[in-house]
Amino acid sequence: MMIARGDLAAEIGFERAADMQEEILWLCEAASVPTIWATHVLEDLVKAGSPHAAR
């Protein structure tokens, strides 16, 4: 599961995004589903060839 915080906030509002992100993480952990918190992942991957590029 990839949690795209910007997309999540656009759907449910910025006020609730952090709480919902935590809830999704807990549910995925309980179900043994690998989870990524995406913040500029695609952009970094395209620009630097790594999803963990330094800013």
Image: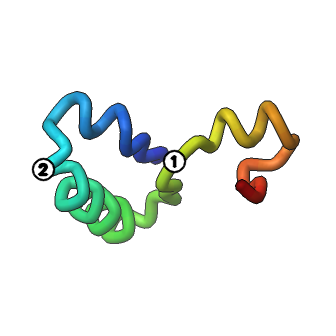
For the residues marked 1 and 2, what is the alpha-carbon distance in whole angstroms? Answer: 18 Å
Residue at position x 37%, y 37% in the image: 6
Total residue callouts: 2
Residue at position x 76%, y 58% in the image: 54
Q: Residues within 10 Å of mark 2 (few under 14, many from 20)?
A: few
Q: How is the image coloured?
A: rainbow
Residue type at numbered disc 1: Ala
Q: Which mark is residue 38?
A: 1
Residue at position x 29%, y 68% in the image: 26
Question: Quick check: 11 left or right of 43?
Answer: left
- Closer-to-camera residue (31/41): 41
In the image, farthest residue toward the right: 49
Q: Position of residue 46 (x, y in %)?
A: 79, 31
Is the C terminus in the top left, top right, bottom left or bottom right quadrant? bottom right
- Closer-to-camera residue (20/55): 55
Disc 1 and disc 2 in contact, CB within 8 angstroms: no
- The relative height of residue 49 versus residue 16 in the rendered view (above or below) is above
Q: Position of residue 17 (x, y in %)?
A: 22, 49
- The relative height of residue 41 versus residue 21 in the rendered view (above or below) is above
Residue type at numbered disc 2: Glu
Residue at position x 41%, y 46% in the image: 3
Q: Position of residue 1 (x, y in %)?
A: 46, 47
Which of the two labelled residues, at mark 1 and mark 2, occupies the earlier sequence position? 2
- Mark 2 = which residue? 15
Q: Secondary structure at mark 1?
A: strand
